[in-house]
Image (spheres, coloured by chain):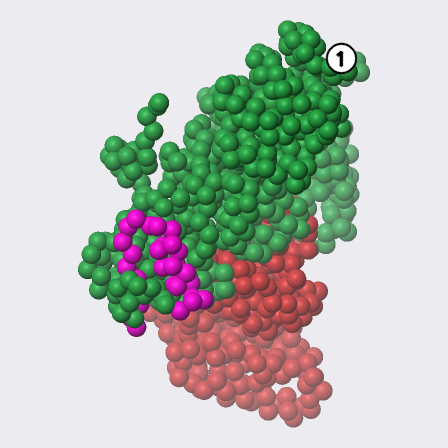
Chain colours: A green, B red
């Protein structure tokens, strides 16, 4: 038997204790606001600590009582006079900061602030919370909450919350931004037989947030998978970095609410912060290696598989069923979930053919027919588990005349023990007839579901994790370019800011692109007709003229772009027409002049760009460009920094990728140049994080290379 | 010469602020400057009271600003015109001896009250002064105003000391400067300087904006000094909101109270204030975030359209008051590039 170390032992072996250690391991706890009155949070907290068999010492603090629930009570924190490792605060918000001051005086470093009445109640609460946050930071005290349910740990055990139920001991950790969701899940999980290592309600996430906890739980030997319900992520970059580290050890499954537009608005109003677009979360989770669940049910279906099953080596699924219909439903779902319905080895097929009735299907999905009994299930399962082509198995059982649910269940449990490297899940479709056998399966570590789709999704979660953790481990560093001119960009940004602007003129934006080795046609800005005539000589005819105004964004729509101007006569008349048109459409816009630009060779029209997501940082976009970009929506996203592999992956996800490779006899574009442009943009925004938006549309791609025809850049007033 | 008369070719080019900033700069040079506004056009004119506070003037406000004539009084009898002129002359006499230099500010623009013979052209001869003429430098065409103004005064023997371009967009500052120097020289008009269009000089702060639109501060009351340089109406789809908001800095975002998500998006960007319209109170979380970000939220009863109308018809301007220490410092810096020392020479 292998050596299993507890968190305590691991911590003793390592030099540094994590600063969150005491939240899960404290052997002395003071409860501020402890009470003898039922219905008060301070009553529940003490009551729960007592009820959970907490092995440490509890110090109730209440200035008005001598005894609380049979324990000696203290007037104040200093009054206790003994070492305290964790404080739980359940008093009104205005009394919280004085307790924190006392903790500082006594050198106590961990606190769970259950008290509400902070940011969630409005501006006064926000001011109080800011003050509290500053104190915690200055004192070096780590705090969970405020406005949270508390924390539960089944290993110590510890119920430092006002949730009355203690979950079954298990290996799933659950972090939640909603306290109420925890109480709901605690109740539900008891019925489902799901066990947990810990539950943490993060509340307002003032000091300890999901990132800190993911890091901590990543090192927790009692936790096999980390689950989280999140409404917002405040430190997106840190979230991604931490998850990338942790998923190499264990899976992280997240349910992020606010997926629809209306849901996002609700989440935004609920948290008071921008909660980000669905796209940004999908992109960030992919980069982080996090598995996103769409529903709470899906989250737990996957989690139960992680809890008891090994990780599959590949996506090859075999389905065993005694009914055709459920087998087909499971097959459909497997396809949707990117699992492969494997082709069984010839040896397996022949073995089954010899032992199952002639009408049985011995190909995947294997249908042992409604007559299938326990023995037939067992021999089939053993055969496919032995098959090299099979990475995981789903056993579907419907109650029919000859069905032996319990015998089959016992067989599944035994075979899983005999072949422990391949994950197995069961679908027992039925109700009361299958209740006993279903409980047997669950109690013996086989995930079991009522319907086929859930069974498939639980197994697909395992494969998704294997795939994403491999991607994270194989990640190559982004390319470093040595032909860039950083000073040139610094100079341009400085001059733009000195003029009180944050949007770059076309000529400035083109110069930025060129400084980072992105090919763009020469562009100059003219402030008057005369100047335009003289700059046109420098560029050479024919040329392109565009109106220059920070306030006119869709130039084409108002006749603000003229292509193929042949000579100075046409230039002058185009200049005047453009100004007239601008005055008509935007009477109050500040028109600075015109941009004159070399003619570019037209090619495939793409859009390439970057937008800074408030949570996760710069997000790159690539796809079909031109004026219909917003309608076609053929784009794909990736978070900066972007490696060559990631750039390729992004481009290959667009529909236009196939066209770029040369469709219907057209010449293929130079794909490598397009990919390199994404990498160069990644390098640019990594060097200049103050770039908020960068759009190149159109971005021409031809067989000979690329050309950034129209570049738009918005920067922040302050350099980061 | 012990006085200088400051006028402009049009309204809202920053005369009052310039007058007070000039007085403060002269004070730093040891010259005691006073302020005089012979005529104002409304009772609620605060220029005189700001000047009295800033320059610590002892005279009564009725001396610093003796006459008010609004557009509703253009039918006044000649006798009353004479009485007003006398009041102005009497006040001038009281002020004239008390200061090394008296800065006299015109009301509205140089032509105001011409038809009742109380405009700058009629008043200046009583004051022993030359004229500084301000005009907006928003674009090249405003240079024409100098030429027109110069002849407006020259015709009656009034000497124009210099012209001053204000509100010049930073983008075109150098171009306007070289054009102005070249063109004005051809007309023998001296260019005293150029004042750029910069928020910290003339833009209002949130307090001034809030009082102009009659709003109620819901949160962020510690951040009312934020400068407002731009206004944006938030009526876009959420998908485009950030891109839109990012293109503007130091802005007040005007948004319906029923669209809190847009207000939250605006607070992610460089925003000075949120104006919630329609009298709809936002979720408390929005107010909490505004405290966190230092962005006041102001509630108004009117709808978005009415608020925009109000702000377009009567743009809010930042004024110099005793409390505006940062704005005063910014103006002081501007005077490094303004040729005002000629005025001191003339005093000798």
Residue extending farthest left: A81
User: As rendered, which of A261 and A304 lies closer to the eye?
Assistant: A304
Q: Name the residue located 65 percent from the left edge and 28 percent from the top edge.
A: A404
User: As rendered, which of B142 and A639 lies closer to the eye?
Assistant: A639
Q: Is residue A68 magenta?
A: no
Image coords of residue A121 (percent x, y): 50, 64
Q: Name the residue located 61 percent from the left edge and 16 percent from the top edge.
A: A379
Name the residue tied to disc 1: A358
Q: Name the residue located 64 percent from the left edge and 6 percent from the top edge.
A: A347
Identify whether A664 is placed above or below B249.
Answer: above
Q: Quadrant of residue A607?
A: top right
Apparent side of residue B80 relative to residue A246 in the rendered image (left or right): right
Image coords of residue A409 (percent x, y): 58, 28
Image coords of residue B33 (percent x, y): 41, 74
* Quarter of the image where the N terminus of chain A is located: top left
What are the residue bounds of the magenta stretch? A37-64
Q: Is residue A520 visible?
A: no
Image coords of residue A578 (percent x, y): 75, 43
Q: Quadrant of residue A603?
A: top right
Query: Dot 1: within a 10 Å radius of its alpha carbon, few (fewer than 14), some, or many (20 or more) residues?
Result: few
Q: Name the residue located 45 percent from the left edge and 87 percent from the top edge.
A: B60
Q: Is residue A103 visible?
A: yes
Apparent side of residue B300 relative to residue A222 in the rendered image (left or right): right
User: As rendered, which of B35 and A421 lies closer to the eye?
Assistant: A421
* Quarter of the image where the C terminus of chain A is located: top left
């Amino acid at each position: 038997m292998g050596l299993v170390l507890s968190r305590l032992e691991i911590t003793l072996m390592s030099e540094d204790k994590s600063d969150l250690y005491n939240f899960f391991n404290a052997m002395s706890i003071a409860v501020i606001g402890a009470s003898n009155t039922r219905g008060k949070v301070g009553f529940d907290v003490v009551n729960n600590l007592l009820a959970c068999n907490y092995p440490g010492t509890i110090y109730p603090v209440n200035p008005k009582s001598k005894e609380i629930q049979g324990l000696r009570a203290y007037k104040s924190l200093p009054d206790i006079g003994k070492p305290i490792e964790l404080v739980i605060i359940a008093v009104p918000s205005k009394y919280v900061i004085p307790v924190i001051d006392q903790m500082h005086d006594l050198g106590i470093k961990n606190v769970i602030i259950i008290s509400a009445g902070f940011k969630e109640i409005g501006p006064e609460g926000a001011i109080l919370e800011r003050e509290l946050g500053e104190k915690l930071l200055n004192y070096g005290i780590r705090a969970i909450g405020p406005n949270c349910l508390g924390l539960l740990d089944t290993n110590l055990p510890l119920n430092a919350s006002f949730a009355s139920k203690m979950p079954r001991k298990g290996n799933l950790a659950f972090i939640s931004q909603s306290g109420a969701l925890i109480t709901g899940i605690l109740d539900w999980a008891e019925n489902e037989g799901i066990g947990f290592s810990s539950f943490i309600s993060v509340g307002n996430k003032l000091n300890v947030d999901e990132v800190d906890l993911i890091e901590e739980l990543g090192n927790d030997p009692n936790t096999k998978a980390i689950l989280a319900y999140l409404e917002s992520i405040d430190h997106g970059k840190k979230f991604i970095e931490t998850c990338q580290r942790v998923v190499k050890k264990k899976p992280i499954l997240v349910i992020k609410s606010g997926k629809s537009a209306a849901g996002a608005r609700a989440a935004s109003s609920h948290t008071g912060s921008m909660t980000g677009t669905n796209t940004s979360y999908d992109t960030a989770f992919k980069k982080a290696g996090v598995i996103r669940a769409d529903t709470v049910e899906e989250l737990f279906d996957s989690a139960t598989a992680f809890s008891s099953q090994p990780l599959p080596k590949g996506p090859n699924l075999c389905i065993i069923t005694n009914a055709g219909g459920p087998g087909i439903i499971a097959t459909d779902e497997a396809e949707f979930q990117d699992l492969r319905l494997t082709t069984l080895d010839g040896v397996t097929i022949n073995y089954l053919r010899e032992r199952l009735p002639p009408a049985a299907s011995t190909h995947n999905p294997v249908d042992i027919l409604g007559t299938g009994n326990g023995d037939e299930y067992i021999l089939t399962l053993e055969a496919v588990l032995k098959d090299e082509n099979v990475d995981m198995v789903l056993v579907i059982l419907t109650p029919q005349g000859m069905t032996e649910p319990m015998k089959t269940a016992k067989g599944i449990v035994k075979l899983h023990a005999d072949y422990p490297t391949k994950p197995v899940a069961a679908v027992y479709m039925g109700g009361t007839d299958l209740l006993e056998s279903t409980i047997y399966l669950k109690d013996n570590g086989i995930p079991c579901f009522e319907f086929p789709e859930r069974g498939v999704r639980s197994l697909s979660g395992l494969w998704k994790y294997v795939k994403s953790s491999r991607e994270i481990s194989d990640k190559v560093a982004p390319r470093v370019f040595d032909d860039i001119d950083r000073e040139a960009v610094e100079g341009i940004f400085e001059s733009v800011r000195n003029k009180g602007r944050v949007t770059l003129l076309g000529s400035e934006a083109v110069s930025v692109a060129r400084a980072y080795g992105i090919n763009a046609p020469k562009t100059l800005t003219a402030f008057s007709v005369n100047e335009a005539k003289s700059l046109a000589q420098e560029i050479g005819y024919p040329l392109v003229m565009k109106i220059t105004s920070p306030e006119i964004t869709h130039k084409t729509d108002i006749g603000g772009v003229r292509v193929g101007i042949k000579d100075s006569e046409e230039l002058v008349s185009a200049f005047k027409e453009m100004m007239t048109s601008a005055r008509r459409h935007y009477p109050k816009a500040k028109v600075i002049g015109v941009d004159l630009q070399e003619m570019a060779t037209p090619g495939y029209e793409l859009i390439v760009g970057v937008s800074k997501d408030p949570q996760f940082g710069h997000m790159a976009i690539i796809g079909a460009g031109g004026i219909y970009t917003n309608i076609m929506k053929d784009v794909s996203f990736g978070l900066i920094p972007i490696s060559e592999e990631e750039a390729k992956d992004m481009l290959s996800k667009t529909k236009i990728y196939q066209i770029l490779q040369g469709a219907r006899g057209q010449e293929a574009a130079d794909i490598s140049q397009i990919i390199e442009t994404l990498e160069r943009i990644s390098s640019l925004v990594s060097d200049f994080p103050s770039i908020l938006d960068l759009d190149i549309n159109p971005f021409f791609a031809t067989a000979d290379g690329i050309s950034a025809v129209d570049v738009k850049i918005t920067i922040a007033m302050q350099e980061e | 010469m012990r006085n200088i008369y400051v006028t402009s070719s049009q309204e809202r080019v920053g005369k009052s602020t310039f007058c007070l900033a000039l007085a403060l700069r002269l004070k730093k040079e040891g010259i005691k400057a006073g302020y005089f506004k012979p005529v104002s056009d409304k009772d609620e004119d605060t220029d005189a009271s700001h000047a009295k506070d800033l320059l610590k003037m002892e005279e009564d406000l009725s001396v610093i600003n003796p006459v008010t004539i609004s557009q509703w009084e253009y039918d006044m009898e000649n006798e009353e015109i004479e009485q007003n002129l006398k009041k102005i002359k009497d006040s001038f006499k009281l002020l004239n001896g008390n200061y090394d230099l008296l800065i006299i500010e015109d009301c509205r623009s140089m032509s105001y009250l011409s038809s009742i013979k109380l405009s700058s052209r009629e008043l200046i001869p009583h004051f022993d002064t030359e004229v500084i003429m301000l005009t907006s430098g928003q674009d090249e065409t405003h240079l024409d105003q100098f030429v027109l103004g110069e002849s407006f005064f020259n015709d009656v023997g009034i000497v124009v000391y210099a012209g001053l371009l204000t509100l010049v967009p930073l983008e075109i500052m150098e171009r306007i400067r070289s054009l102005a120097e070249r063109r004005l020289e051809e007309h023998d008009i001296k260019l005293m300087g150029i004042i750029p269009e910069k928020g910290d000089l003339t833009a209002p702060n949130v307090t001034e904006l809030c009082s102009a639109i009659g709003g109620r501060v819901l949160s962020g009351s510690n951040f009312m000094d934020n400068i407002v340089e731009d206004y944006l109406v938030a009526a876009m789809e959420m998908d485009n909101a950030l891109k839109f908001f990012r293109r503007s800095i130091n802005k007040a975002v005007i948004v319906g109270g029923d669209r809190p998500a847009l207000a939250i998006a605006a607070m992610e960007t460089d925003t000075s204030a949120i104006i919630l319209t329609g009298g709809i109170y936002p979720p408390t979380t929005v107010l909490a975030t505004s405290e966190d970000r230092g962005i006041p939220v102001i509630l108004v009863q009117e709808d978005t359209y009415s608020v925009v109308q109000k702000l377009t018809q009567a743009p809010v301007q930042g004024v110099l008051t005793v409390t505006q220490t940062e704005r005063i410092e910014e103006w002081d810096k501007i005077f490094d590039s303004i040729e005002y020392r000629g005025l001191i020479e003339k005093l000798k």
